Amino acid sequence: AVKPASGGQLVYWSMWTADEPQGKVLQRALKCFQDKTGVKVDVQWLGRKAYTQNLVPALNTSTVPDLFDQDVSKVGAAIMTPGGTQSLDDVFGMKIGEGDKTVKDVLSPTSYDFPQNKDREGHSFLVPYEIQSSAWWYDKAAGGALGQPKTVDELVGLFDKAKADGKAAVSQDGDIPFYNMYYFTQLAERYVGAGGLAKAAQDPTGRAWTDVPGFREAAAQTARISKYFVDGWDAAKFPQIQQRWADGDARFLYVGTWAPSETREYLDKQGAGTKIDYGSFQFPMPPGATHDTVEQMSIGFAVPKKAKNADAAKAFIAYFLNKGNLAGIPAVADNLVPRTDLAVPDDLKPVKAVLDDQKKEHVLQYDGIDAIAGGKWQTDVFDPADTALLKGALTPEAFVAQLAEKSAAFWKNQH
């Protein structure tokens, strides 16, 4: 690929730990990069909290890494918003070591070309190497293969059948706020489309929540689904409820594309030889909705504004997107990548087919509302209302009214 013009070393702070599958894939690529370029690589395997615990405090010092990784919403909220990232527009034109192919040639445009991956000047600040989405998961061996439910009524019918079979319908780890966000945001996006939720969240008057009929209707459909959550969903500690799903206590689980790898690892550790034949389908269209959406989350590399070896960082980004390196993500980490020409893990093929469908309207996960105001809007305004809606403590009308009121108060206090 490209040999960096300057910078004899590369300091990388990773969101993975060294023994995680993604960590192993990156270790191999970093070693090869060092061997081929002579660039000395210094990597810190810091885990998920690296960007808040390590990077954000470091931004005000002279000690920042040259390269870090995280999902685009977290980078946007914590690093880009205070001006801590630099443009990676030039990386898209760099060769990846496959003839004349560039980064731009091999990446799906929907994986990087969207408003939430632009800084104030309109430059891309993240280059993706992994894509996540979400789905309803079930065990085909337990209840047979299911088609895509066309309506929420059909979905609820599947829950009723599960209960008739003596099973809980939906496993839900209620102590994880972003797991609780899935239901309303998925349904609301189908009414308002890409950008609609983010626009409402940033409305300083808060009135969008009550003025747009789709939000109340999405809340009404969410309230129907949450009635089917497994007993104790709001009192357990993750991953207890997910493990109960893996053990067969509940029929359905709605989470990200990491579900098969996480639950398979859990079952393997149990040592009973239990296997799941993973099936999945997407949220159906709620009544009157017109946007055929699919959610995605891009995880990728970013370069701090103060990086001393930006050339080396950018060279590694392009190098990692080479087919020989990136193939490790589906093969070893059982996850999806933003290239369309690499193998797809069997369990994720239905999700990948939806992501690759050009007729679908692609939406950043939660429409990026988790990144607004550095993530504070979600924690202060959305999460309390959402939890109350799921628990049945707020009606759909009261839910949108609370969002409107608290959102207006939130924005008033930001000035």
Image: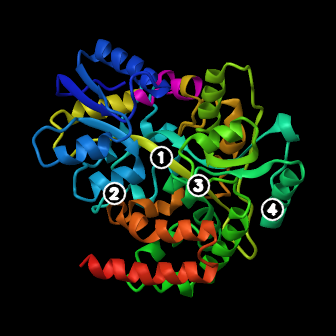
Q: Position of residue 413 (x, y in %)?
A: 28, 79
Amino acid type shown at disc 2: Ala
Where disc 4 sits, the SS reads: helix
Give the Cα separation between the discs numbered 3 and 4.
21 Å
Q: Which residue is mark 4?
A: 156
What residue is pinned by disc 1?
Answer: 298
Q: Which residue is mark 3?
A: 295
Determine whether the residue tagged by mark 2 lies in a helix, strand or loop.
helix
Q: Which residue is mark 2?
A: 77
Tell me the quadrant of the picture where the N terminus can be found: top left
Nearer the viewer's eye, disc 2 or disc 1?
A: 2
Which residues are drawn in magenta? 320-331
Q: Amino acid at mark 3?
A: Glu
Identify the residue at image location x=28%, y=59%: 81
Task: Name the quadrant containing residue 88.
Answer: top left
Q: Residue lying farthest left?
A: 62
Magenta-colored segment: predominant secondary structure:
helix
Mark 2 or 3: the one toward you: 2
Magenta span includes 314: no
Report if the CB atoms under discs 2 and 4 are less than 8 Å apart: no
Question: Distance between the Cα atoms at labels 2 and 1?
Answer: 14 Å
Give the label on residue 375, or none: none
